[in-house]
Image: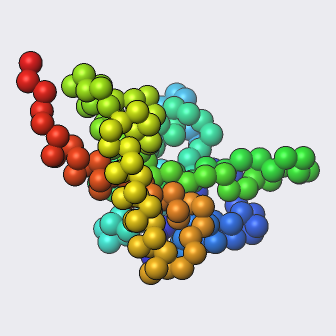
Amino acid sequence: MPILINFSHPLSPETKQQIFQSIADVEIRAVVVQINHDLSMASQISKIVDSTALSGDEWRNDLYVIMPGYAPAATVLLAAIAGRHGRLPFLVALRPVPGATPMRYELADAVDLEAFSKQQNLYQTAVNDGREDATADYSEYSESKDREEIASFCQDKVREVEKKSGELSAIDYKKSYIAGYMEKTAQLEQERPKKIN
């Protein structure tokens, strides 16, 4: 079963239901993050990750995280999780509910950080190679001669998932589209002639 580790605010029942419906039927584990600025952050983060009590098998599951609000701790924590998990996790982003008193949070987005990182790598590789199809919009290749082929492949990938799972949520649609994008762009990268300096 996928696991969601919450390193941030406690989740309300409503937020948990949003996560179950929009992302996955995950097991939620809450972990408190408190940083002592007089001690090594890396050693503290390592102990915090230990406190998740994930087994070896559980580290191989899909892993979702809600990060703490303190950016330096979140950065080191992400590095620790990626090292133990073998890939970047899925990031679950929350936002305050407008006008809610007391303040409460709702699901804003979910990002596959590993796929996002690879997309960025593909874009930067295109820039470094000086290719004309490199554009600032890595997710669209909007000026690329491959745009229509990539878009068509991604739509086919989404339809393939819909046939198996039924109508997709917005987040599942995005994940399926990203999977198609990654598969097709990797194929095009292999087929494309390398630039010779």
Task: Please indicate whether residue 183 sits to the left or right of residue 176 in the image.
Answer: left
Q: Residue furthest top?
A: 197
The residue at the point 44 percent across, 42 percent down is 139
| Above or below, comparing residue 24 to residue 98 in the picture | below
* Quadrant including the C terminus: top left
| Front position in the image: 163 or 122 | 163
- In the rendered image, residue 14, in percent from the top left (x then y), is placed at 76, 67
Residue 161 visible in the displayed image? yes
Screen quadrant of the N terminus: bottom left
User: In this view of the protein, which residue sits in the foreground, 106 or 40?
Assistant: 106
**Relative to 57, residue 195 above or below:** above
Number of labels in the image equals 0
Could you say which quadrant of the image residue 143 lies in?
top left
Identified at 40% across, 38% down, the residue is 141
Identity of the residue drawn at 51% across and 57% down: 174
* Residue at horizontal 8 percent and vertical 24 percent from the top: 196
Q: Is residue 84 visible?
A: no
Q: Position of residue 194 (x, y in %)?
A: 12, 33
Horizontal and vertical percent position of residue 38: 52, 28
How far across and down, in percent of the image, does residue 117 sit?
37, 42
